[in-house]
Image: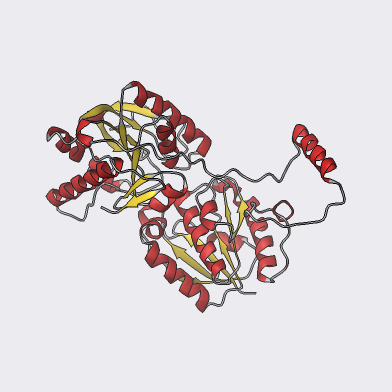
Amino acid sequence: MATLTTAIERAGIPAVVVTALPTIAAMAGANRIVRGIAVAHPTGDPGRPPGEELIFRRRLVERALELLATPVSAPTVWEV
Amino acid sequence: MKVVHYLNQFFAGRGAEGAAGLAPERIAGAVGPGRGLGLDVAVTLVCGDDFFGEHETEALPQLLAWLEEEAADVLVCGPSFGSGRYGYACGTLAREAVRRGIPAVCGMHPESPGVPAAAGAAYVVPTDERVTGMRDALPRMAALARKLGARALIGAPDAEGYLPRGLRHNVLDERPAAVRAVDLVLAKLAGTVTSEAAAPPERIPPPPPIADPAGVRLALVTESGLVPAGNPDRLESNRARTWLEYPLQGVTAFAHGGYDVRAANADPNRLVPLDAVRALESEGRIGGLHETLYTTTGNSTPVAVAAGFGAEIAQRLHDAAVQAVILTGT
């Protein structure tokens, strides 16, 4: 996933990665990373009631957008 | 010599992706590939790949505590071949074992994220990307493990068959520098240079941030293998040969052999957060959404291939005047 991100960023487009494995993404060159819930469902949580899950996912996307609007100088990992 | 071996859930026979959430286990004796090492494996440690990745602060201390309790002389991890999560677990555990005084050797493909995770502390024996490389990998890992366990002196990477660890060892060479320089050029021309350091992963300086999401055209990209129901274009579930683009509305099913797809099949928003992005778009918090999803499967895809996909996707994004990307990865 970091390889795709690097290629997109080389085109000058900032990309934020949402993944449950932020250490791997950072090691491979991703610059903006938000920690996802789990490998098999980074932006969802089957354990929550559907309404709550959507609220959580909105929060996660908001965090991703905030990070896109934040200057970073090195691989940066944000929690939701 | 007391040998401890580390395996993931799959190679320990605990199950495939459905068992990737398995918490650490300690088993007496050799299991699975451990039987093929030709070493007297005293204990096998097992952990699910997802469990290690998602709960490293829990899994790693438990595995290390067992390793120290067993007073291992050497730790052998894998081989994990081209697997990302398994490789990462192997490299991380091996590195931390070495830092606690227990020598360790892993086997994995040189592009595995486990190689940087091993951080030059643990030895990494290069293997094939695929499990078919097992027979070739085991004796080479075992040979190094025997030496490490006996605290024997380990020679240069080429001689011992492991990846360079980023260390330098000074040796005296009878040839003057000018002769060595010419020799190296000649060897390069002849294609016989064997010991050049591997290039570290490419780092792109972070692009400047976007000003305000409310004025930005956003695109969604994923390497989760999200595809329309029925997978009409036959996206591979691993070692993808292509990337695909689909209108955002039509994508509901998954092709990915690297994780348990049940939760995502029940609700695709768990992989690509379309419902949340749409809600924010309708509230004016996102300027606009590019109506195309770019998708591929990031499971055991060689780095060079993924870089090619990325360049092609980046071109499409650029042509579509996309200003920011949310990329989801599994």
Q: Position of residue A42 (x, y in %)?
A: 30, 48
- Image point 31% across, 35% down: which residue? B325
Q: Is residue B20 visible?
A: no
Q: Residue B157: x percent and y percent?
A: 69, 53
Q: Position of residue B323 (x, y in %)?
A: 30, 30
Q: Quadrant of the N terminus of chain B?
A: bottom right
Residue B32 horizontal/vertical position (percent): 53, 60
Q: How many marks?
A: 0
- Position of B109 with respect to B57 (left or right) is right
Q: How is the image coloured?
A: secondary structure
Which residue is more in the foreground, B162 or B169? B169
Determine the image quadrant of residue B256. Answer: top left
Foreground of the two, B151 or B173: B173
Residue in front for this viewpoint, B169 or B240:
B169
B241 relative to B180, above or below: above
Question: Which residue ends up furthest to the top in the rendered image?
Answer: B319
Q: Is residue B123 left or right of residue A12?
A: right
Residue at point 50%, 53% (across, down):
B87
The relative height of residue B59 versus residue B175 in the rendered view (above or below) is below
Identified at 25% across, 41% down, the residue is A65
Foreground: B52 or B168? B168
On screen, B56 above or below B288?
below
Is residue A62 visible in this depiction of the protein? yes
State left or right for residue B114 relative to residue A33. Answer: right
Q: Is B306 rendered above or below residue B147?
A: above
